Amino acid sequence: MRNQIAAANWKMYLTWQQGQELLESLASQIPALNGNHQVIIAVPFPYLTGSLEKTAGKKNVFIAAQNISDKKSGAYTGEVSGEMLASIGIPYVLVGHSERREYYHEDNAILAAKLDRALENGIKPIFCCGEPLEIREQETQNAFVETQLKESLFHLSAEQLENVVIAYEPIWAIGTGKTATSQQAEDIQKHIRSVVATQYGEAVADKVSILYGGSVKAANAVEIFSQPDVDGGLVGGASLNADEFLAIIKALQ
Ligand code: PGA
């Protein structure tokens, strides 16, 4: 059974005081999570250690970093390495979020290196992919996403790939209030799984969790998560509100 995951992405929101309140509220209300249900909360770097403390002992609740350097170590002011994240016990990291690709010029080759840095330090990457609006309008989204997967992921071994979570996030649906329909999400996520199967075989593809991201909220989570190739969501805006995010967690299948 694949992991079904509700992942929060706080982005560059919340002070640490607000973050602590949110974590306390979540920690006290998150229902006991079944074996394959997971909650992952991606917080800003300065909050990582404190967030680990706030969620300590909560089964299947994990803290993630939002970024990782493509370099191993060295004179790279402002960067945070995989080794550093591993040394404080961070189990997950976001890689390739569209905001990183767009505003910080992270291309498929840099993202491939970031995946390597995470995996060689025992950190599981949540690899984000997804097309901009003009690609969706040309109906070439399948080929676009396939290239993202090939150029960043497919140098990994099958064993490594099993430690990667894929998040499909159409850029036109992120923070816009415009959600892909559950059928649009299912169609492309099924395609993503088939592309992974072609490269690594059905058994591996079957194990990889593929999340949907882009304006997921309490009101649409059940419908989106009910699709067979949607294994949960990566949630931005709605993850900043405890009640909203708790409802999304409860929508896991
Ligand atoms: P959103 O963000 O839920 O606010 O659309 C999703 C994301 O960027 O991961």
Image (tube, helix red, strand yellow):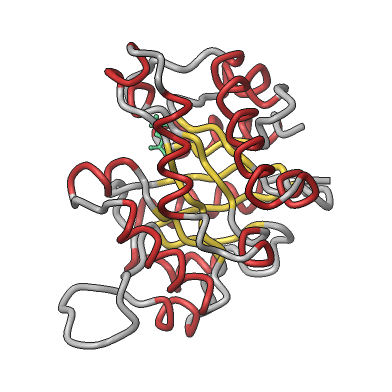
The residue sitting at the bottom extreme is 74
Q: Is residue 182 left or right of residue 97?
A: right
Quarter of the image holding residue 110?
bottom left
**Quarter of the image that includes the C terminus:** top right
Q: Position of residue 246 (x, y in %)?
A: 61, 36
Quarter of the image holding residue 65?
bottom left
Quarter of the image holding residue 50?
bottom left
Q: Position of residue 76 (x, y in %)?
A: 18, 79
86 or 113, which lies in front?
113
Q: Give the total number of marks visible in the rendering.
A: 0
Q: For ligand 1, which image quadrant applies?
A: top left
Residue beneath the point at 30% across and 77% down: 71
Relative to 173, is 113 above or below? below
Residue beneath the point at 68% across and 48% down: 208
Q: Is residue 226 left or right of residue 167?
A: right
The residue sitting at the front extreme is 198
186 or 193, which lies in front?
193
Q: Position of residue 165 (x, y in %)?
A: 59, 51
192 or 14, which lies in front?
192
Q: Position of residue 193 (x, y in %)?
A: 65, 37
98 or 24, which lies in front?
98
Residue beneath the point at 44% across and 29% down: 143
